[in-house]
Amino acid sequence: MNQHGAEHELLYIFRKKAGLPSPGKSLAGWYGGRATTFGQVLGAFAKMYRSTHDDRVRNNALFLVGEWEKCVDAEAAVLDNDTYCFDKLLGGLLDAALWGARMIEWYTLPENLYRASELSGDATFAAFAKEWDYRYFWDKLIAKDPTIGPGHAYSHVNLPPGCGRIPQSPLLS
């Protein structure tokens, strides 16, 4: 793939929905109506990059994620989709984050997962949030230890509110 070919077709439906310029054309069939496999494509790139360390593959994944983010920023309705598409998209974004194609701020995920648990009453969200808890950071914060280490300052500012949503939060004890 290159940034003038198939990537534009993969992004077409998101750009159209966001009202952004949409070079290329819409893909046909199942993908064309809902972009059902976009997350799976991201996941495939991430896994391929992890296996090969080929920067061309990484760059394709970064391009797709970055352009998709522009669409979401322009129009939140880009996120409106069924649970199947959401599941595939979330999986692809997580693969890209975890396997080196994109370092997202994974440690900010618990807050919204805990919020989803509070709102829905579904403990599954809270259980999944625990998978992302950043105890190292919270323990350093509680101990008033300034040697937290490298990180993105803005994201670390977002951590305490997320921690505060945890039942028996370490910050509230």
Image (cartoon, rainbow, N blue to C red):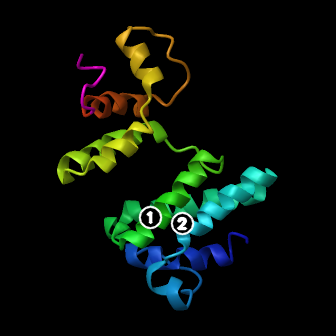
- Mark found first going from the N terminus, 2 or 1: 2
* Left or right: where 120 falls relative to 22: left
Residue 39 is labelled as: 2
Which residue lies at the image location 39% right of the left edge and 77% below the top edge? Answer: 17
Tag 2 and tag 1, C-beta contact below 8 Å: yes
The segment highlighted magenta reads 166-173
Give x and y (percent) for residue 102. Answer: 60, 49
Up-down: is 95 above or below 130? below
Up-down: is 80 above or below 140? below
Q: Which residue corresponds to mark 1?
A: 87
CA gap, disc 2 to disc 1?
Answer: 8 Å
Question: Is 168 in the magenta?
Answer: yes
Question: Is 55 in the magenta?
Answer: no
Q: Nearer the viewer, residue 129 or 18?
A: 129
Quarter holding the C terminus is top left
Dot 2 crowding, Cα within 10 Å, few <14, some 14–19, many 20+: many
Which residue lies at the image location 39% right of the left edge and 37% below the top edge? Answer: 130
